[in-house]
């Protein structure tokens, strides 16, 4: 083989690995939003699609003319730790009203290729009013308009709608705001990543049980008032109630595996091995870390076989990951940090900076620490940087910072919350992956400097700060968005 041919093969291998990791970090890539990333996926779409199909059982749809690539990621168990987030500086998770409006607005957008924000809001309000199981949407309420804008901005970020004239945020201030949108209905129908359509699992006349499946959320300043009360509204008496958890489980059934996940499966060995390969590698590419106790006995047995080990190593190699295997579990490390939609540590997040600092205290306490104890430690951090983390300077700021830091640590598989305790007495333990940060004194020092510089900048003590965008060492893949 000539040197030019060798170079071509090497270039393709690099592109394929990069394309795989780009899609894991952003399952919906657009030519308009990320032209360079989309170009890689478009150019190498066939081998990239083959990798996802063989190792994960996921479908990749690339539409060069429409300018998007959609990786249809499927998880057998939805992960509530990765919610949709509001397009604001707080990045607060969606509450029930925002999820409802997201779904209602998405349905109303199917009406045509062009719409206005006023027309869309009126249709959403009518749809909510027509279904007693949905919380009402009042366009005269500023909080309601804010929730509506959050849902619409999220759809904008996915490339489903684009503002042709006007600015979406203007609707928060006035329901008379004028915004014209172009709608991409083709891309809209690609958003749902489920092997079974909702229409095939919901019977006619049925209604989703109010509040079912809702995760508790900490209220924020822009939450819709009385959400909790609205969520409990009774449905019409002649409607059948459906548990949302059951609905989602039915939508995620993949018939090709049969009962392969059962303790005593009746499917053939080939179907069983197909499920084992897909289920194990899905976890490895979609979760920050996979602990052995999180896997079934069959999955652990598969990883102990020569075939299983070869498959996992081959998948990592082709995708450009480095496989770390420890007594406690497995980890796919992305040296370039592109396979993740969230990073740890992160200089821009007060909660993540605090989380890294709190890891020292957690690792020094094998039995764990209570939220109250972590709040005391968070208070010390705040006291040491009096002008940093302005949003945590309220009376309960240290407790909120500790809770938010623990949320980040749990999301990245670095800490766990023991069951059996609630509130301030809840016990948090460091998990084995936290040992990756035991020698990150340089990171701690740098992040402390970042926080200090940000605090000084906020008070006018400095005029500028250096580039601190680089993360610490290697980022752990935290899984892409839905």
Image: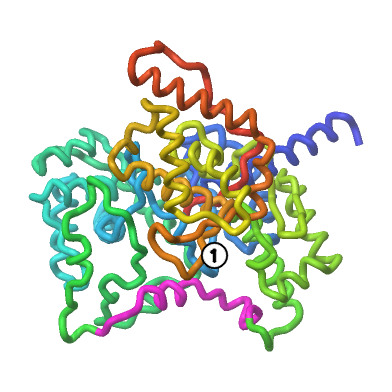
Q: Is any atom of residue 67 visible in this view?
A: no
Image location (x, y in percent) of residue 315: 74, 54
Q: Is residue 100 above or below residue 374?
A: below
Q: Is residue 218 above or below residue 19?
A: below
4 and 170: which one is in front?
Answer: 170
155 and 232: which one is in front?
Answer: 232
Q: Is any atom of residue 176 visible in this view?
A: yes
Left or right? Give the position of 133 relative to 78: left
Q: Which region of the structure is painted magenta?
A: 240-261
The residue under the point 58% across, 27% down is: 445
Image location (x, y in percent) of residue 426: 45, 61
Residue assigned mark 1: 75
Magenta segment includes 259 = yes
Left or right? Give the position of 369 relative to 476: left
The residue under the point 37% across, 46% down is: 400
What is the quadrant of residue 32 in the picture?
A: top left
The residue under the point 21% across, 71% down is: 232
Image location (x, y in percent) of residue 179: 19, 38
């Amino acid at each position: 083989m000539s040197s030019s041919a060798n170079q071509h093969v090497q270039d393709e291998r690099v592109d394929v690995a990069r394309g795989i990791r780009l899609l894991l970090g952003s399952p919906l890539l657009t030519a308009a939003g990320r032209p360079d990333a989309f170009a890689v996926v478009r150019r190498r779409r066939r081998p990239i699609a083959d990798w996802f199909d063989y190792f994960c059982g996921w479908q990749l749809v690339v539409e060069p003319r429409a300018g998007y690539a959609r990786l249809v990621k499927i998880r057998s168990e939805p992960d509530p730790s990765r919610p949709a987030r509001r397009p604001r500086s707080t990045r607060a998770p969606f509450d029930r009203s925002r999820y409802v409006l997201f779904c209602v607005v998405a349905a109303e957008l199917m009406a045509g290729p062009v719409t206005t924000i006023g027309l869309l809001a009126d249709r959403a309000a009518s749809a909510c009013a027509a279904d007693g199981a949905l919380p009402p949407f009042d366009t005269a309420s500023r909080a309601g308009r804010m929730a509506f804008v959050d849902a619409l901005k999220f759809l904008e970020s996915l490339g489903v709608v684009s503002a042709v004239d006007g600015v979406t945020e203007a609707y928060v201030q006035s329901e008379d705001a004028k915004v014209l949108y172009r709608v991409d209905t083709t891309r809209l129908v690609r958003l749902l990543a489920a092997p079974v359509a909702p229409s095939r699992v919901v019977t006619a006349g049925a209604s989703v049980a109010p509040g079912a499946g809702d995760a508790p959320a900490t209220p924020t300043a822009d939450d819709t008032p009385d959400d909790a009360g609205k969520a409990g509204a009774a449905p019409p008496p002649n409607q059948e109630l459906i548990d949302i958890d059951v609905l989602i489980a039915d939508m995620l059934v993949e018939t090709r595996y049969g009962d392969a996940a059962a303790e005593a499966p009746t499917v053939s060995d080939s179907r069983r091995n197909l499920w084992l390969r897909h289920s194990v590698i899905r976890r490895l590419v979609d979760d920050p870390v996979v602990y052995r106790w999180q896997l079934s006995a069959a999955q652990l047995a598969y990883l102990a076989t020569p075939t299983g080990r070869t498959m996992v190593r081959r998948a990592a190699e082709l995708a450009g990951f480095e496989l770390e295997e420890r007594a406690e579990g497995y980890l796919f490390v992305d040296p370039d940090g592109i396979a993740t939609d969230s990073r740890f540590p992160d200089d821009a997040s007060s909660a993540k900076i605090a989380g890294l600092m709190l890891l020292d205290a957690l690792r020094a306490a094998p039995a764990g620490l209570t939220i109250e104890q972590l709040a005391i430690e968070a208070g010390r951090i705040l006291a040491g940087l009096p002008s940093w983390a302005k949003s945590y300077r309220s009376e309960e700021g240290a407790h909120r910072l500790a809770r938010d830091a623990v949320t980040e640590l749990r999301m990245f598989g670095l800490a766990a919350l023991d069951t059996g305790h609630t509130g301030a007495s809840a016990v948090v333990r460091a998990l084995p992956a936290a040992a990756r940060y035991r020698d990150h004194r340089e990171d701690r020092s740098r992040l402390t400097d970042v926080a200090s510089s940000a605090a000084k900048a906020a008070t006018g003590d400095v005029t500028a700060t250096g580039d601190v965008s680089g993360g610490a060492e290697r980022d752990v893949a935290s899984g892409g968005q839905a």
